[in-house]
Image (cartoon, rainbow, N blue to C red):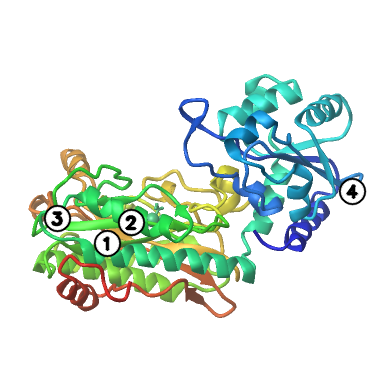
């Protein structure tokens, strides 16, 4: 975790922007796999991490803005627990690490909230995304589940988004570490892939890189020869020459910051002519989007710029026809690119998504579209220095979508269905990297990973299924 003053300063800022009320932060609990003491990997809530830095289960905190008092709540371990866990820091010792002087037990918190919920002071809390925290809120605030789910504080959400959206130098250092480890995961994948290996063998190696670096995965690995399935977590296929594999993975540092990158490359040493043609269209859309990144530019425009670059390329490949601007305005390109160009990234891989996409990625005057394609664009608002985001264009050939649209003759003026039929088993391509918006443009985060056809093929030829010497 960072120095205590970092958390104290973040809380001061939050108090100033809220002005009044009680702010209740719930840390996460252990989450059971199949019985109470058999847990999934523990992950602290990112807002709790941001304001308190403590990554242990069973904690909560209250900032009483009116009385300028912050308290961390939790129960010290009993000897029964210590027998299993060994001695752990007391709640008071933990609190001092985040610059908090006051502590209380869970019972103290229950009493405080029961009193406060009858009083005049506004209790601000965030939308709970774990059922156990909804249940706690319901009991503590004496509300039914439905009232709890509607009672979160919009001013608190807005105040937090306006802090967490701007990454500090300390945070950028952490994100860089996460992306460097993520780059190592990709180098491992790009060098280990070989005909006859199973997808799951490579997935195991990616886990090893992330966990071996002291952290975790920032989201479940996507490693697949069926890259057209956007969030494909099946890893049971055997790799064969001729396949294209899509690897979307990320590491999380010990401090909780995420990386998120994608590479797509052939199981063979070289791309086929057809794979190369579509791959270069995606790389060109990626580079075009990166060049468009600058403070003040709405990310929605960058997304549409990338969509036009993809459409231009697909026209060149004979898969689309007609006027590029008209095709993108009509949404015809979403046959090939059904999702958004990118999202914020930080303590969460999709940063702050628990707070609501409308508040994180859009504004009062810019609402998220409900149109196919744009409804999956998580970030639309104007970019500002300090934002960290991903750029991840792709081409995904989804047979089910071809069949549906073709039967409706949808966008037939822009899509060459006859040629597309011969691509129906092509798969998918995505190229994803992480960027910091600066005063003058954007900076790539983490160390570079082979991306052009020449770079990728060189790495594939040299590796022969062995780990790269650069790794
Ligand atoms: N890894 C999921 C995404 O790229 O958004
Ligand atoms: Mn991403
Ligand atoms: Mn990704």
Residue under circle 2? 206
Residue wearing tag 4: 68
Q: From mark 2 to mark 4, how far is it between C-alphas? A: 46 Å
Which percent across, then down, holds residue 263? 29, 63
Q: Is residue 298 visible to the viewer in this orientation of the structure?
A: no
Farthest bottom residue in view: 440
What is the CA distance from the residue labelled 4 to the residue labelled 1?
A: 51 Å
Mark 3 or mark 4: name the one nearer the start of the chain: 4
Query: Which quarter of the figure is the C terminus placed in?
Result: bottom left
Residue at the (59%, 28%) spot, across then down: 132
Q: Under tag 2, what secondary structure?
A: helix
Residue, disc 3: 416
Sequence-first disc among 4 and 1: 4
Q: Nearer the viewer, mark 3 or mark 4?
A: 4
Question: How many circles with numbers are drawn on the protein?
Answer: 4
Disc 2: CA contacts within 10 A as few (<14), some (14-19) or many (>=20): many
- Quadrant location of the N terminus in the rendered image: bottom right
Q: Residue furthest right?
A: 67
Circle 1 residue: 189
In percent of width and height, residue 442 lies at: 50, 75
**Which residue is more in the foreground, 356 or 205?**
205
User: Considering only vertical position in the picture, is 216 above or below 449?
Assistant: above
Which label's residue is closer to the chain start, 2 or 4?
4
Relative image position of residue 334 (x, y in whole percent):
30, 52
Q: Is residue 63 above or below residue 180?
A: above
Q: Earlier in the sequence, mark 2 or mark 3?
A: 2
């Amino acid at each position: 975790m960072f120095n205590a003053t970092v958390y104290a300063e973040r809380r001061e800022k939050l108090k100033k922007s809220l002005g009044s009320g009680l702010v209740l932060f719930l840390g996460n609990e252990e989450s059971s796999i199949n019985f109470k003491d058999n847990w999934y990997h523990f992950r602290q809530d990112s807002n709790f991490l941001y304001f308190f830095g403590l990554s242990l289960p069973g904690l909560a905190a209250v900032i009483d803005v009116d009385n300028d008092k912050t308290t961390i709540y939790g129960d010290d371990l009993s000897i029964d627990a210590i027998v299993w866990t060994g001695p752990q820091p007391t709640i008071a010792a933990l609190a001092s690490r985040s610059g908090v002087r006051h502590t209380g037990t869970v019972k103290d918190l229950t009493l405080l909230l029961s009193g406060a919920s009858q009083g005049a002071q506004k209790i601000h809390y965030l939308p709970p995304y774990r059922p156990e925290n909804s249940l706690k809120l319901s009991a503590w605030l004496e509300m039914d589940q439905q009232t709890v789910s509607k009672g979160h504080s919009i001013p608190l959400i807005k105040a937090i988004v306006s802090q967490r959206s701007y990454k500090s130098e300390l945070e950028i250092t952490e994100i860089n570490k996460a992306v460097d480890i993520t780059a190592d995961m990709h180098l491992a994948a790009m060098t280990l892939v070989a005909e006859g290996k199973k997808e799951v063998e490579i997935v195991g190696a990616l886990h090893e890189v992330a966990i071996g670096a002291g952290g975790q995965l920032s989201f479940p690995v996507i490693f697949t020869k069926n890259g057209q399935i956007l969030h494909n977590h099946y890893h049971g296929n055997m790799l064969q020459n001729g396949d294209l594999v899509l690897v979307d993975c990320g590491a999380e540092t010990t401090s909780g910051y995420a990386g998120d990158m994608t590479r797509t490359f052939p199981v063979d040493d070289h791309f086929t002519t057809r794979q190369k043609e579509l791959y270069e269209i995606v790389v060109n859309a990626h580079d075009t989007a990166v060049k468009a990144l600058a403070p003040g530019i709405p990310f929605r425009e960058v997304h549409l710029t990338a969509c036009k670059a993809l459409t231009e390329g697909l026209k060149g490949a004979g898969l689309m026809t007609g006027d590029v601007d008209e095709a993108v305005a009509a949404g015809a390109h979403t046959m090939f690119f059904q999702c958004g160009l990118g999202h914020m990234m930080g303590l969460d891989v999709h940063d702050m998504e628990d707070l609501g996409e409308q508040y994180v990625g859009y504004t009062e005057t810019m609402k998220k579209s409900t149109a196919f394609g744009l409804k999956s664009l998580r970030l639309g608002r104007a970019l500002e220095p300090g934002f960290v985001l991903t750029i991840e264009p792709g081409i995904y050939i989804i047979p089910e979508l071809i069949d549906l649209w073709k039967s409706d003759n949808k966008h037939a003026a822009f899509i060459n269905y006859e040629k597309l039929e011969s691509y129906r088993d092509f798969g998918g391509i995505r190229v994803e990297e992480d960027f910091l918006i600066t005063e003058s443009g954007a900076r790539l985060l983490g160390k570079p990973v082979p991306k052009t056809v020449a770079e990728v093929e060189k790495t594939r030829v040299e590796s022969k299924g062995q780990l790269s010497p650069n790794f």
